[in-house]
Amino acid sequence: MKLTIERAKQWMRKYNEQIQEQKTYLTELDQAIGDGDHGLNMARGFEEVIKKIESTNYTSLDALFKDVAMTLISKVGGASGPLYGTAFLRFATSLKSEKEADRTNLAEGLNAALEGIKVRGKAHAGDKTMIDVWEPVVNYVRTESVITGRKLAQLAKEKMEETKDMEAKMGRASYLGKRSIGYIDPGAASSYLLFASLADCFEKGELQ
């Protein structure tokens, strides 16, 4: 099963549904250790993403994901817009003019997105950020010969939950020091939802 243009749209639709359903929870997480607006910002941004991609006919994956990126950069404030926008822009660039992506293409694209997040956010694994979900998930997709949606979602959830026991080293949460321990990082939570939504698109088949 490959990531086609229609499946890419399905991924974004599912993610938007998850973000809209969980925006209050994401905002509560951010109110505890951050700026307090992560859920609302993401919900507003992905509403705009869906409007854009549903009204456009795409002939390549990079054009679709470039629209996702530019919409998030222009519509989402705080750190979320630049970080997710950069991720999708790097993802789009990696996919070039492809109409569909196999496991290798997807792994390369996700790795490019991860590197973009690192450059933009200047964070590393263990800093209690979205990278603590992205890095292990990208490594899983790059190194395993068989990728299943169930394992992908399970790994992303486990890594999100592990941020609860971490001390924040980056962003506003780092001002709290050890008091940031005990809370799931909101960026890690929204990243889990992103990969769980991708996994849903492959629920009945392996990614090849």
Image (spheres, grey):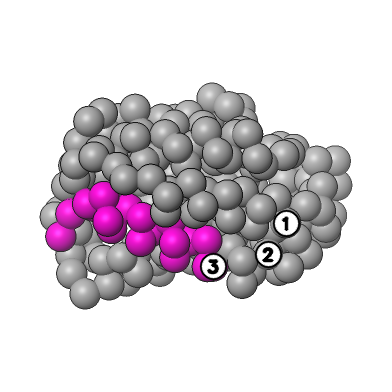
Asked if 80 appears above or below 183 in the picture, the reply is above
Q: Which amino acid does label 2 sit on?
A: Lys
Q: Are marks 1 and 2 in contact (CB under 8 Å)?
A: yes
Q: Which mark is residue 140?
A: none
Q: Position of residue 42 (x, y in %)?
A: 64, 52
Neighbour class for label 2 at 10 Å: few (<14), some, many (≥20)? many
Asked if 181 appears above or below 200 in the picture, the reply is above
Q: Which mark is residue 23?
A: 2
| Residue nearest the observer in this picture, 152 or 38 | 38
Q: Position of residue 47 (x, y in %)?
A: 58, 55
Neighbour class for label 1 at 10 Å: few (<14), some, many (≥20)? some
Q: Give the range drawn in magenta.
A: 1-18
Q: What residue type is labelled 1?
A: Leu
Q: Name the residue under label 3.
A: 18
Task: Point out the tag, 1 or 2, that comes first from the N-terminus.
Answer: 2
Q: What residue type is labelled 3?
A: Gln
Asked if 193 appears above or below 130 in the picture, the reply is below
